[in-house]
Image (cartoon, rainbow, N blue to C red):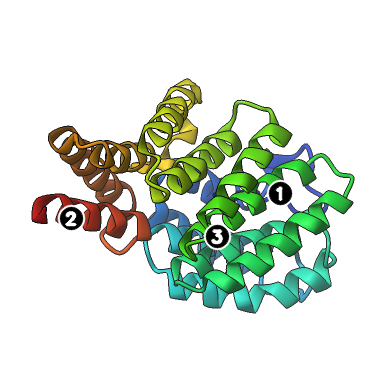
């Protein structure tokens, strides 16, 4: 999962006064094109002085919004340019910098650069484990989720399963981090043809997803349905699997557009079902 945070160095407790308030609200509402435009406008307006933290923070929101629209390569380029800036302004192991690195790594995985994603997520998780701030456990959980995804993408499913189970046990909070880790676990189980177990995990994820505030639903649109559809197909329930896969595709198309990696994954599953 992608972490989202937009406070500057001196903005704690004063979010309503932040120049990023509008871009933040648009992104959280799922209005990604509008969030990108607003964030870029803020960045342009605050490009001077050189060390104003709001300009790079605004561009990090633009990168998140770009990625959410399926423009993964463009988002990765923005992250690459921001990394040294964040390191200079915030420090190399500051939560903002680690968050940026985690988000960048998971964008690399969308570009099939899974080894790079694995290495960077592992490094971020280690750095977060060394940290002491309240954000660090969440940064570590997000990085471990990216690592689970990268391991699955490389066919290392037992490793992904073990890491997902460990991360869930460590995190122990019923929130979005647990949700995405459960989905990563379901993915690893499906890939090992343990579809009954995968369906149980997907159903747990579905229950948790429904319990979360609605404003937290958008980033994971279609993910639960996709996990369920894959498990159902593996169990031989083709009709139900197709219904779930079609729902996942329609949801992802509406939320992220046709070029997003989850939309493409849902489309590929539909094609697989229809071609069987």
Label pair 3/2, CB-CB below 8 angstroms: no
Disc 1 element: helix
Residue wearing tag 2: 272
Q: For the residue carrying disc 1, how many other residues have a C-alpha within 10 Å: few (<14), some (14-19), or many (20+)?
A: many
Q: For the residue carrying disc 3, how many other residues have a C-alpha within 10 Å: few (<14), some (14-19), or many (20+)?
A: many
In this rendering, is residue 122 above or below 137? below
In this rendering, is residue 82 above or below 132? below
Looking at the picture, how far across and down is residue 70, in whole percent?
Answer: 37, 63
Residue wearing tag 3: 151
Residue lying at 69% horizontally and 41% vertically, measured from the top left: 15
Residue wearing tag 1: 139
Looking at the picture, how far across and down is residue 170, in whole percent?
Answer: 73, 35
Q: Is residue 37 visible?
A: no
Q: Nearer the viewer, residue 147 or 248?
A: 147
Marks 1/3: CA–CA distance: 18 Å
Disc 2 element: helix
Q: For the residue carrying disc 2, how many other residues have a C-alpha within 10 Å: few (<14), some (14-19), or many (20+)?
A: few
Kindly report which numbered mark, 1 or 3, lies closer to the viewer in this rendering.
3
Which residue, as the protein is rendered here, is positioned at the far left? 275
Residue lying at 39% horizontally and 45% vertically, measured from the top left: 190
Q: Is residue 104 left or right of residue 239?
A: right
Disc 3 element: helix
Q: Is residue 159 visible?
A: yes
Residue lying at 66% horizontally and 54% vertically, measured from the top left: 143
Kindly report which numbered mark, 1 or 2, lies closer to the viewer in this rendering.
2
Q: Nearer the viewer, residue 10 or 243?
A: 243
Q: Quadrant of residue 168?
A: top right
Looking at the picture, how far across and down is residue 162, in whole percent?
Answer: 62, 45
Looking at the picture, how far across and down is residue 119, in whole percent?
Answer: 67, 69
Q: Quadrant of residue 138?
A: top right
Q: Is residue 170 left or right of residue 217?
A: right
Q: Earlier in the sequence, mark 1 or mark 3?
A: 1
């Amino acid at each position: 999962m992608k972490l989202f945070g937009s406070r500057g160095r001196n903005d704690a407790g004063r979010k309503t006064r932040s120049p990023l308030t509008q871009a933040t609200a648009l992104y959280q509402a799922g209005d990604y094109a509008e969030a990108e435009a607003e964030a870029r406008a803020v960045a342009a307006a605050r490009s001077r002085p050189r060390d104003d933290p709001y300009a790079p923070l605004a561009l990090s929101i633009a990168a998140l919004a770009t990625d959410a629209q399926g423009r993964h390569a463009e988002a990765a380029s923005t992250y690459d340019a921001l990394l040294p800036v964040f390191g200079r302004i915030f420090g190399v192991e500051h939560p903002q910098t680690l968050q940026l690195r985690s988000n960048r790594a998971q964008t690399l995985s969308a570009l099939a650069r899974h080894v790079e994603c694995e290495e960077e997520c592992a490094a971020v998780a280690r750095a977060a484990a060394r940290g002491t701030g309240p954000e660090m456990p969440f940064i570590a959980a997000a990085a471990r989720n990216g690592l689970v995804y990268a391991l699955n993408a490389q066919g290392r499913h037992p490793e992904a399963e073990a890491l997902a189970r460990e991360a869930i046990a460590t995190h122990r909070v019923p929130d979005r981090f647990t949700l995405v880790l459960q989905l990563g676990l379901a993915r690893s189980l499906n890939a090992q043809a343990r579809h009954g177990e995968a369906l149980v995990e997907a159903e747990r994820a579905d229950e948790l997803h429904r319990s979360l505030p609605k404003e937290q639903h958008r980033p994971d649109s279609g993910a639960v349905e996709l996990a369920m559809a894959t498990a159902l197909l593996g169990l031989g329930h083709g009709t139900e699997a197709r219904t779930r896969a079609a729902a996942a595709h329609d949801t992802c198309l509406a939320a992220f557009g046709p070029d997003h990696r989850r939309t493409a994954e849902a489309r590929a599953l539909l094609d697989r079902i229809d071609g069987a």
